[in-house]
Image (cartoon, grey):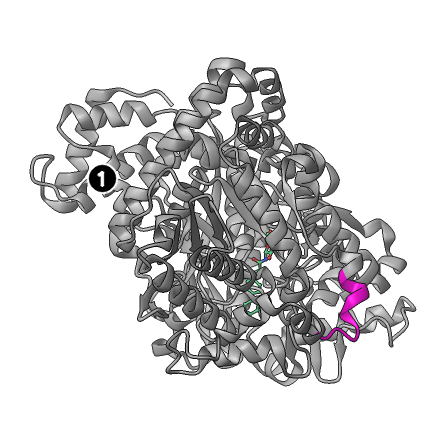
Amino acid sequence: MKFNRKEFLQDVERILHADFKTDLKSADKKELYNAVSKAVMLEAYPDWETSRAADKRRCGYFSAEFLMGRAIFNNLMNLGILEEVKGALASVGEDLGQFEEVEDAALGNGGLGRLAACYLEAAASKNLPLDGYGIRYRYGLFRQVFEDGYQKEEGDDWLRWGDPWSVRVERDACIVRFSDMDILAVPYDMPIFGYKNGVVNTLRLWSSEPVRAFDFDLFDTMKGDTKAVDNFNATKICDVLYPNDNTMVGKLLRLRQQYFMVSASLQDIVKKFKAAGRDIRTLPEKYCFQLNDTHPVLAIPELIRILRCEGLSFDEAFDVARRTFNFTNHTIMAEALERWDVLALSDLLPSVYEQILGCQERLEREGLDRDRFFIVRDGTVHMANLAIFVSSKVNGVAEIHTNILKTETFRNWYERYPEKFVNITNGITPRRWLLLNNPALAKVIDSKIGEGWHTDLKQLADLRPFVDEILPDFKRIKGENKQKLAAYIKEREGVEIPSHFIFDIQIKRLHEYKRQLLNALSILHFYFGVKEGSIQNFPPTAFIFGAKAAPGYYMAKAVIKFINEIAKLVNGDAEVSKVMRVVFVQDYDVSYAEKLVCAADASEQISTAGMEASGTGNMKFMLNGTVTLGTMDGANVEICEEAGRENNYIFGATVDEVNAVKHGYNPWDIINRTPELRRLLDTLVNGTFSDERGMLRRLYESITGGHEPDRYLVCYDFADYIRVKEELLRDYGSDAFYKKSLLNLCAAGKFSADRSVRDYSDLIWHIG
Ligand code: 26Q
């Protein structure tokens, strides 16, 4: 984008005056942020219009979550005006950096939502016509604070900062009908800027409002037969993001959210398609839709319903739907697979449920065995089965994950439709996750291999011949990033971390299968070892955690409490704290992640093998030159393939081993012959830590008792984890270690979201 400092500052002044009755001299941070953003938006409009109007086949990415993070820096960078805007603001005495205080748009929980954000950015950067469709939650993912080591949740009022990067599009409002009320859906469009290529795609987020019967146009479409409007409840639908990650909650409001977003999106798309004079039967020629897990799967029966209203027979409508939809699965955890009660669904959405039944009938007519293939059974609707049956393509998100889908989770479907199943390994955008968060390192790379890697990440391989040469720069920059992170942690958490310590980092949602508990036990093991002298010359290490626990997930919250207690013990110990620190940062989010991944020496990716579909944090660390301490799970497997297993620290049971030991597994066999482990577990119940709520005791029981003790094989993997973790910590500091780290960076090319969206386009979307 071309940039004229004088005109830009004039625009800013004008907007400040028009919107806030103020000027550059007296504007506060929020006003300035809004004016600067809006001035940029004005400039970007023509390109947005051009990109929209292009008569290309498009893909709609349907997702209940888009974890966008902070927009301003990324947008300025992609528009190629980051330095220019910084300079313009500096010329009037303002620091662009002040906008680091602007709240993240946290309209997602974790991996799945952040993946959607990375894909939108990558598609725009690759000139692929991909648009996002989702929900404009009034409150995003809760803010986390610790009180006495316990997690507490607060509301995420992200709109407090205004929303200058969205445009409300009143003329595209439509009505979504539930059996008990009609709701007005109003879209807010966010521009998605491609990296320095002039492409602008759209993220359309729907907001619910009461139907205003006095609105003439809408009144017309309602033809007067609107249901009693519950004006009070209407807005509630989009009030808040459900804070669950990899667990299903069967709440009716969640179902309303899902239907609300897909109905509004499809109505909008179909309406415009018809207005362009096209035959609705040709929809699949112009559009395809990617279903981001099962959360938007009601789009399938909703499209069929709409098409039947347009006069198509069920089979005609079904065939259009089957040619239009594709489905991504992100999890094999049974508790995350969405199922809805037939009574609830049929009561809330009778005509949608009718189409679901139609799909079940069609399945039977196609001769599929009712015992092995079902959408509706025993009073439950199985959303994944509906998605697989009606989609053209079904994909997993890493090789190992797709293989598990084929051989276990959806084996029956794979046997019947082998050609439907494809793998698309996840990727991350190198713009946010290296260029933006680690500019110093990016510059060094530029100086050796040019800037081609910004949009063709495979070129990082060309850096290999320079690894020795740039090692000193790499060390220096890592050190600087660690210093900055330490200062930030000191300010936010009040914990001091010497920056010469090893930074060992585990950041991701809190879940038992991700095994933060295993990490915690290892820290306690090192603590006792150092304290009692059985471990000599322990390499000074800071163990850093960041994670939110779903508010209703008891065990996850217990793990947070446990780690905070360990932190208190370790950091409060005058002797041990010379070589160990532990900190659980509060309110971990995308912006915090940007600071953490560029400052890490070790990336903890320690899920029980077979349980992490892919992971994407692992890729972010790798791209910033960090070794992985991990299991052979998810994308870790491919990281080892690309970077060499010898350049990472791999431990623990493999998927085959997990499957072999799971039956008849008794952790006591291990605990009894490992006194050290027993001692660590005992701290959960023997008064080492304060546990006035009995949380730690319950944690103890989850490992040692119940009908499935130690479900996630913490005890099984403990010894090997300690062995490999010690090896890593001992290796740290040598040139060989930094070389391993850098070789990971050089091998990160495969994990670009650019490659992922290209794969989606080639194998599934065919959009360019
Ligand atoms: C479902 C029903 C009701 C309420 C909530 C949910 C729900 C919400 C979010 C279920 C699952 C999720 C999120 C899943 C998720 O983030 N999965 C992660 O996806 C990443 C991107 O593919 C992978 O890298 C991770 O391995 C996977 O855990």
- Amino acid bearing label 1: Gln
Q: Nearer the viewer, residue 154 or 485?
A: 485
Where residue 142 sits: x, y (%)?
38, 64
Report which residue position mark 1 lands on.
Answer: 98
Asked which quadrant contains residue 628, the reply is top right
From the viewer's perspective, is residue 342 above or below residue 500? below
Write the residue at 49% across / 52% down.
506
Residue 141 sits above or below residue 369 on the image: above
Q: Is residue 665 magenta?
A: yes
> Which residue is painted at 28% across and 47% down in the image?
102
- First to last magenta residue range: 658-666
**Is 384 on the left or on the right of 561, as rendered?**
right
In the figure, 356 relative to 634: above or below? below
- Report x, y in % for residue 270: 59, 53
Residue 32 image-quadrant placement? top left
Q: Quadrant of the C terminus?
A: top right
From the viewer's perspective, tell me whether residue 144 is left or right of residue 683: left
Note whether residue 291 is visible: no
Residue 355: give x, y in percent of width and height. Answer: 70, 71
Label 1 crowd (10 A; few <14 / some 14-19 / many >=20): few
Figure quarter occupied by ligand 1: bottom right
Quadrant containing the N terminus in the rendered view? top left
Q: Secondary structure at mark 1?
A: helix
Question: Is 49 included in the stretch rendered in magenta?
Answer: no
